[in-house]
Amino acid sequence: MKYNIKYEKKCLKYLKKLDRDTQLRIIKAVNQLPLGDVKKVTR
């Protein structure tokens, strides 16, 4: 399943203040969340 991730204006402004390596690391991690970093909750 493919998700569209929309970044809020406030988030983009914050990311622009960071150095390039940190920006890429955060964006990469956020984009990989829907691929399997989410665990199903069981009771």
Image (spheres, grey):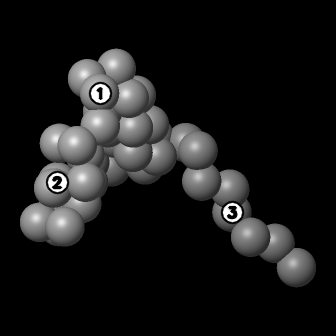
Residue 9 x/y as whole percent:
11, 66
Residue 37 x/y as whole percent:
58, 44
Q: Amino acid at mark 3?
A: Lys
Q: Which mark is first along the chain, 2 or 1? A: 2
Q: Report the residue marked by disc 3.
A: 40
Q: Amino acid at mark 2?
A: Leu
Query: Quick check: 39 above or below 26?
Result: below
The answer to which quarter of the image holds residue 14 is bottom left
Locate residue 13 relative to residue 27 in the image: left or right: left
| Local SS, label 2 | helix
Residue 23 x/y as whole percent:
30, 33
Tell me if label 1 and label 2 are in contact, CB under 8 Å.
no
Q: Which mark is first along the chain, 2 or 3? A: 2
Q: Residue furthest left?
A: 9
Query: Quick check: 19 above or below 29?
Result: above
Mark 1 is surrounded, within 10 Å at the Cα level, by few (under 14), some (14 to 19) or many (20 or more) other residues, namely few
Residue 31 visible, this orientation: yes
Q: Amino acid at mark 1?
A: Asp
Q: Nearer the viewer, mark 3 or mark 1?
A: 1
| Local SS, label 1 | loop
Q: Report the residue marked by disc 2.
A: 12
**Residue closer to the observer: 28 or 17:** 17
The answer to which quarter of the image holds residue 3 is bottom left
Residue 40 x/y as whole percent:
69, 63
Residue at 55% across, 42% down: 36
Locate residue 13 relative to residue 35 in the image: left or right: left
Q: Report the residue marked by disc 1.
A: 19
